[in-house]
Amino acid sequence: MALTGDLRSFNFVDIFQVIGKDRKSGILFMEWKDLTCAYYVKEGEIIFARPIDKVYRVYADKDFDLLLSKLRMSAEGLSKTLERFLISRLNMKEGIFSFTPGFIKYGGEYPVVYPIEELIVLASRNLTPEEVERKISDELLLFERVPGKEEVLQKAKLNQMEWHILSLIDGERTVLQIRQMVNQDSLLADRALYALLALGLIRRKKKEVKQKQAPITLELLAKIIERIRSL
Amino acid sequence: MRQIKKIKVVIAGPFAAGKTQFINTVSEIKTVKTERRTQQSSEKSVKDYTTVAMDFGKVRIDDEHELYLFGTPGQFRFDFMWEILGEGALGIVILVDSTDPTTFHEARKIINFFQSRFPVPIVVGANKQDMPNAWSPEDVRIALDIDEEEGIPVIPVSAIDKESVKNALLTLFEIIRTNLTG
Ligand SMILES: Nc1nc2c(ncn2[C@@H]2O[C@H](COP(=O)(O)OP(=O)(O)O)[C@@H](O)[C@H]2O)c(=O)[nH]1
Ligand SMILES: [Mg+2]
């Protein structure tokens, strides 16, 4: 299934979240203004990046180990390519992405120097006010922590500010209160919240709303279902 | 003459998600549309007209009951019209254009809107699955940040296909039934 879009409306935090969530494998293509890059994704981790002149060249090299030996790329060199072609570009807002699952044959294990969780955090530090507003859209939003996420927390490498924000989330404090409690630019707080949400470390707290007396009988409901079936 | 009772379901979603199409596909009447040329140039490229009043369709259930499908108006987001629409609805279908990730954030805001006001079942339809560039329902679910605990299924929909629209409505009503019995 195609996963394509424009960075302007679907930023890197969002992209990494989708790639990481169900541990996808494949290739993420980025058409930047100045160059096109292929990012190799194995089980939810981005392990290698390279600029390409033609997309079809990537399809010609399906065997990842062969490709690495062709490029004379060592395992240690892999993370350097991410620094050069991904991490240094996380502040760029213009580009078209597409993710193609599968088709690359990976051999064994490759070093993951920048886990997807860390990339999410790094990307979040570049979000603009317009971008954070898409998810942190309401001052009265309530978040709560999701238990059992120690591993994610380790990989995410949060800075002190982001830790502080996480510690303030208790299911009671609103976004507004959290912004006020960190004596900083509220954009920093919002970016952290955006990242924590993408990492699955926090979630929206559901309002406890009592279901009112059902305005419908089971008998009528059965009738409706029958009727829809017969349409 | 006996009064006919309205059973209400809201069909919500961002601009061009396929609400009008969804309603038209199953309704016994054509949607009552008050179309107006869209102003924004960006929206104009998608389609020339948008719904400014209200889409609705209906399906007769029996002598006393009609199922009403109300579409949310496209241009005024989250205004009093939406509140009125949600009031008394049995459930809500939120459609997302699976081929257009630029609308996903808007879709999430719409979910938030209904979730925080109306304690009724919500089903998200990942629409336009017939298109080759559609995101899968699972990827749409992740992009919309819907976690399992929210109890909101994300199902494949193609609003141009009657069976698919029926399936979306049935999914919603089965949840309503489960809530009623459980
Ligand atoms: N291929 C395809 N097109 C659809 C589908 N649903 C809606 N459309 C098209 O998408 C456009 C917007 O649909 P519309 O129902 O007007 O969206 P609304 O703004 O949500 O009411 C129209 O051109 C529809 O014909 C679908 O399931 N498949
Ligand atoms: Mg419409």
Image (spheres, coloured by chain):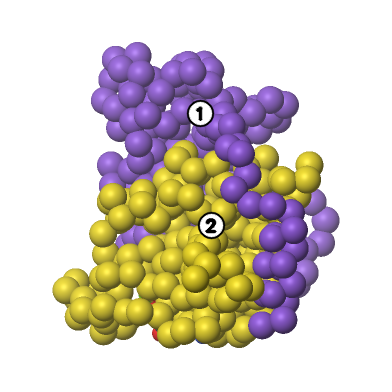
Give me the chain that's yellow. Answer: B
Position of residue A126 in the picture relative to residue A229 (left or right)? left
Q: Quadrant of the N terminus of chain A?
A: bottom right
Residue A101 against residue A155 in the figure, above or below: below
Query: Vertically, is A9 above or below B25?
Result: above
**Can the viewer see residue A174?**
yes
In this view, the residue farthest toward the right is A108
The C terminus of chain A appears in which quarter of the rendering?
Answer: bottom right
Question: Which x, y percent locates residue B52?
Answer: 26, 70
The quarter of the picture where residue A210 lies is: top right
A3 and A110: which is toward the camera = A3
Chain letter for the purple colouring in the rendering: A
The residue positioned 43% from the left and 77% from the top of the image is B20
Report helix, strand or loop for mark 2.
strand
**Quadrant in which ligand 1 is drawn:** bottom left
Report the residue at 63% width, 73% height from top: B62
Q: Which residue is mark 2?
A: B92
Which residue lies most toward the front here?
B1
Q: Position of residue B39 (x, y in %)?
A: 16, 74
Chain containing the residue with disc 1:
A
Where residue A65 appears, as percent x and y from the top left, is 76, 65
Residue pictured at 35% horizontal, 36% vertical: A138
Q: Residue at x 70, y 60 (%)?
A: A221
Residue A52: x %, y % from top left: 50, 73
**Quick check: A166 left or right of B40?**
right
Q: Quadrant of residue B67?
A: bottom right
Q: Nearer the viewer, residue B32 or A198?
A: B32
| Residue linked to disc 1 | A143
Q: Amino acid at mark 1?
A: Phe
Q: Is residue A52 left or right of residue A79?
A: left
